[in-house]
Image: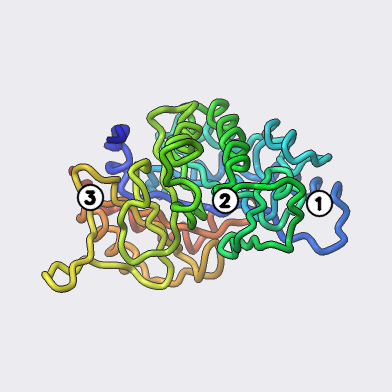
Amino acid sequence: MVERPDMAWFRAARWGVFMHFLAPSFPDGTEGGRAVDAWNRQVDAFDVAGLADQLVDVGAGYFFITLGQNSGFYLSPNATYDILVGRRPSRCSQRDLVADLAHALKPRGIRLMAYLPSHAPADDRLAVEGLRCTPAWDASKWQLRPGRYLRTLETDERLSVFQRNWEAVIREWSLRWAEHVSGWWFDGCYFPERMYVHEDEPNFHSFRAAVKAGNPVGLVAFNPGVREAFDANTAYEDYTSGEIADMLPVAVDVPWQAHPLGRSDDGPQFHVLTFLGQYWCQGPPRFPNALVVGYTQYVNRNQGVITWDVPHTPEGLIPEPFLRQLSQLESIEQRSY
C-alpha cells in the first residue's frame, strides 16, 4: 500500500492555472548559440511579479509551469542533464525560473507545480541519444521511432538506463526546489506495462522516489493520455492526471453505464486538466463564462480539483480575455470535503 501525502490543501484550492511556457520551434539551420540566446532572453523576460499579482487577483490556489518539452529547451539549469547530454552551450536556461516563481508565489499563498515529460525531448537528437532514450520498439506516442536516432549502445526493452538517467535529472531539480514545488505532473506515461510496472527498479516506485527526493509530501501524477474515465494510472500517483480535450466528462450513475467521477477513500485525488483556449496554450476562450464556472463547480461538488490551461503573453502574463474568465471563478463558493 502506497502512503499518500495529505492533499487537503489541493482539494481546498478547488482550481488552478496551467501555463505552457515553451521554446519556439527554431528554423532549420538556426545556429545553436543563437537559439540558446533567444531562449534565455525569453526566460529572462518572464514577468514573475506580474503573473503572481494576476493569480492573486483571480483567486487561483496553485499554478503549473512547464519545465520543457520536445524541443529540449528547459527553463531551469540542471547540471546532471548537461553532463548526460553533453551539449555546449546548454539548452537549460541560465535563469532558474521555477525558483523565481516560487519566491514570488509562496508569500501570496499560491502553490507552485511543475510539468515535465516522462521521456527525452523527441526533437533533440543529441539529448535522446545522450539520455539513452532510444527504444528498439515504436514509440510514436512520444514522437520517437527507430530511424530518428542512433542506438550506439544497446538498450533493454524497459529503457532501464534512460529511466535511471531521467530519475537523476528529476532528483537534482527536486532537491534544489524542495518544498517550494508542491507537486509534479508527468506527461507521456503511455507505456507503463513496458517500462514501470515491474517488481524490480527502475519502476513507478523509483520514479516516485526521485520526484519526492526534495519534498516527500509533494504530489505526483503520471499521465497515460486523454481518457474519458479518471482511473488511477498506478497506485504510486497521488492525484489523477485527468487530461481531457474535446469533451467534459460527467458522471452517469446508472447500473448499465457507470462512469467513475469523484474521489475514492483509498484512491488518488480526483483531478481534471483541460484548456480554456482553442487548444493547449492557443487561441481565444472557447467557452462562455457560465460554462467555465458551472463545470468548475461540478468537478468541485464531485470532490474534485480542476486545472485550466491558458495562453500567455511574451512576458509570461495571462492575456486579458482569460483573466476576465478566470476572475469569474473567484465567486465559487468554498466547499469542505
Query: Residue 309 in the image: x percent, y percent?
Result: 47, 57
Q: Amino acid at mark 1?
A: Ala
State the SS at label 2: loop
Identify which residue is drawn at 28% across, 43% down.
Answer: 11
Q: Which residue is mark 3?
A: 263
Label pair 3/2, CB-CB below 8 angstroms: no
- Circle 3 SS class: loop
Q: Type of residue at label 2?
A: Glu
Q: Residue at x 14, y 67 (%)?
A: 253
Residue 294's disc number: none
Left of 147 or right of it: where is 301?
left
Whole-angstrom CA distance, mark 3 to mark 1, is: 45 Å
Q: Amino acid at mark 3?
A: Arg
Quarter where residue 2 is shown = top left
* Mark 2 nearby-residue class (10 Å; few <14, some 14–19, many ≥20): few
Which image quarter is the C terminus in? top left
Q: Which mark is residue 35?
A: 1
Q: Is residue 316 left or right of residue 150?
A: left
Residue 292 horizontal/vertical position (percent)? 34, 64
Q: Which residue is mark 2?
A: 157
